[in-house]
Amino acid sequence: MPEWLSDAVFYEIYPQSFFDANNDGIGDFEGIIQKLDYIKDIGCNALWINPCFDSPFKDAGYDVRDYKKTADRYGTNEDLKRLFNEAHKRSIRVVLDLVPGHTSEDHPWFVESAKAHPAQYKDRYIWTDHCFTRPEGLGFIGGEHERAAVYITNFYKCQPALNFGFLKPTEKWQLPVDHKDCLETREAMKDVMRFWLDAGCDGFRVDMAMSLVKHDDDEKTGTQAIWRDIRAMLDKEYPDAAIVSEWSNPSQAIKAGFHMDFFLAFYENSGYQNLFRNYKMDEYNNIIGDDNSFFKKTGKADIKCILDDYLFHYKNIKDAGFMSIVTGNHDLIRLRYALTPEELALAYSFIFTMPGVPFLYYGDEIGMRYLNIPTKEGGYYRTGARTPMQWNNGTNLGFSAAPSEKLYLPVDSALDAPTVEAQEKDPASLLNRVRMLLRLRHAEPDLQSKANLEIVYAEKERLPFVYKRGSFVCAVNPGDSVVSVPLKGIYEPVYSVGQCALENGACSMETQSFGVWRIRS
Ligand code: NOJ
């Protein structure tokens, strides 16, 4: 386990939208370099950069055309290496986004494999044996290429699935995971990882990590075995490199060898949904009906339901890896869409005092809004969470000096659009709240990734929620009534949102409050 994860706090950057240093309307590596001091200053010490490789950008770069070459719009490989160096000078780690499950349909491997008689890469992707043979239970495309077969997709049409094999092949065209050609695909991915690790990156966020082996079983046995093999390579050759999976099942992902997995689950009423996103939307992304998220003042989410999910994974993975709770990401509607800044302060206090490795999505530190705007690069509803970072009140909110019509995406035009500059000056701002929380976390090992979590008070449909982290007690009351529970001991307050007290044998929480106390006895 890379030691640096024990106090890591990640900052996710969607590179298109962070900072445009060359004024062409789109963010770039140099822009990220110029903002490293800002990132360090808010308390983040690791970056996850969304795919920044050569791509036709039909899915914002998750359709990679060349794994070993950066996209021109962000800069050169040398610029990215400079970014690694500059980040390391400031003790910031950098993980890149690895997309192992599929490439762009323009990737030279695919172009070759789609020929009537491929000279190589015949089985680098999954092709059936006939132009009318349809793979059962898998997305596929036919009729587009010379090759008289259909190919399996992993996500969009533009993203053919790489061939890591089938768990239990039932047709001749389905190869077993240990077939030479499937092993070659795996080695090709290791080669990509070595390439960037040698260039100075510190690891990878792995896209759709659970998607490699087709017709896998529920436990993802086949896919897990592949990742364990890749992890063995890392342990041997790059023991300081970290991998975080997009698996949405930490129990499986950590067993598969990942150091971290996101605490994300998109099925209805999952613990994750109940925390921040327990609402329904219509086709125009308007929230319909009640928002019952736990952190909503009027929300009705049950902490027990959230903990059932969280603790199930927590117990399974303990000591072997971490769960990562995110403030948001490039696929999610921003939290600010449904939560007020007051509610965000409570949600962030929770995220940054929980175990595991937390992730802050760029702009969430100032409560950037989700914008209802037309799709870009395959984003659809996600596009509104990918708009330019809001630095100040200048041209294009300080993101770029390009004419506004040239921007990658429009900036928030609201008169009260939050900016870094304005929030820097306000001691009570969300930005300064995040700084305060991260300062506390970095100062206290008991609030960091590894320290134990113990539930002190969590009752069905009751508040507050009280938990212990080593020598600290944390309590939150997101609701609209005053609540109190008995709690013996002597405590010293170290952090709070709103009014709360832990004294005279009781934990008393006013509406919308959060407290952290050091246990004295
Ligand atoms: C998950 C990524 O986060 C998302 O943005 C992308 O569209 C799909 N995987 C496909 O790679």
Image (cartoon, rainbow, N blue to C red):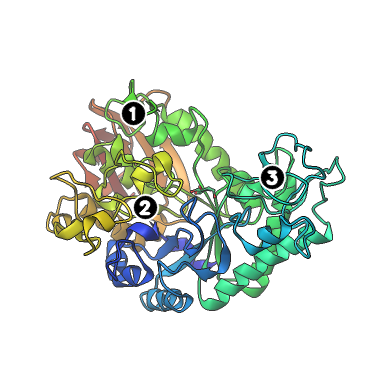
Q: Earlier in the sequence, mark 2 or mark 3?
A: 3
Residue marked by disc 1: 463
**Residue 262 vertical placement versus 396 (above, below):** above
Q: Nearer the viewer, mark 2 or mark 1?
A: 2
* Quarter occupied by residue 497: top left
User: Dots 1 and 3: beta carbons under 8 Å?
Assistant: no
Residue 236 in which image quadrant: bottom right
Q: Secondary structure at mark 3?
A: strand
Dot 1 amino acid type = Leu
Circle nearer the N terminus (1, 3): 3
Quadrant in which the N terminus appears: bottom right
For label 2, the residue is 361
Element at label 2: strand
Q: Is residue 158 left or right of residue 459?
A: right
Front one among 446 and 32: 32
Q: Is residue 301 above or below residue 476?
A: above
Q: Position of residue 36 (x, y in %)?
A: 32, 69
x and y percent of residue 496 in the render?
23, 46
Q: Which residue is mark 3?
A: 152
* Count of numbered tags: 3
User: Circles 2 and 1: CB distance less than 8 Å?
Assistant: no
* Residue 350 visible, this orientation: no
Which residue occupies 41% across, 78% down?
82
Q: Residue at x 55, y 43 (%)?
A: 248
Residue 139's disc number: none
Note whether residue 240 is visible.
yes
- Closer to the chain start, of discs 2 and 1, is 2
Q: CA distance from mark 1 to mark 3?
A: 48 Å
Q: Residue at x 34, y 68 (%)?
A: 32
Q: Residue at x 48, y 60 (%)?
A: 51
Name the residue nearer the viewer: 262 or 121. 121
